[in-house]
Image (cartoon, grey):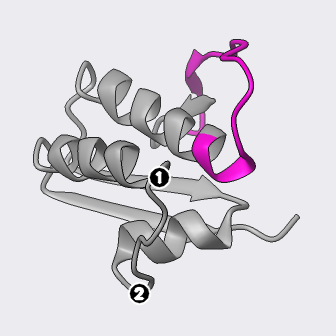
Amino acid sequence: MLFIDDDHKNCYVHSEVIGVFTNNQTELFGIKHALNKAIDYLPCKLIIFTDSLNCCGWLNGTYKVKSDNILPIYEEIQKLKLNFNDVKFMHVPR
């Protein structure tokens, strides 16, 4: 995870081992951690870039979450989004 400010300077860099999960779960855990950390910076606008098309679809509201192992993390992220005026999730191809 990397936070970059408006001047394109690194503000925060983080990585960790979280255990054995699906790709989608790990992407969502990372997004959840990013939102929790972004609260410290209180940005007006937040753009999260991910290579997960599924996560972008779920979090931007174009896909419906159907998996029981994804739904709890998704719901936590939805609550965290309320801390910001504008949050966008952008897909970045690999």
Residue at the (41%, 87%) spot, across then down: 62
Query: Residue at 30% of width from left, 46% of height from top?
Result: 77
Residue numbers of the magenta segment: 7-25
Rate crowding at label 1 as few (under 14), some (14 to 19) or many (20 or more) other CA atoms within 10 Å.
some
Identify residue type, mark 2. Answer: Thr
Camera-side residue: 8 or 62?
Answer: 62
Where on the picture, by quarter, is residue 21?
Answer: top right
Whether label 2 touches label 1, CB < 8 Å: no
Q: In this view, does 13 lie above or below 60?
A: above
Q: Is residue 79 above or below residue 55?
A: above
Outermost right residue: 94
Q: In which quarter of the image is the N terminus?
A: top right
Query: Residue 15 lies in magenta, yes or no?
Result: yes
Q: Where is residue 6 in the image (x, y as percent from the top left)?
A: 45, 43
| Residue 39 position in % (x across, y down) | 23, 27
Nearer to the camera, 41 or 93: 93
- Hey, which residue is sitting farthest bottom in the picture? 62
Q: Which residue is identified by label 1?
A: 70
| Helix, strand or loop for the magenta stretch, by majority | loop
Residue 53 covered by magenta stretch: no
Residue that numbered label 2 is attached to: 62
Q: Judge whether 83 appears above or below 37 on screen.
A: below
Query: Residue visible at 72% across and 67% down?
Result: 92
Task: Decide which of tag 2 and tag 1 comes sooner along the chain.
Answer: 2
Kind of residue sitting beneath label 1: Ile
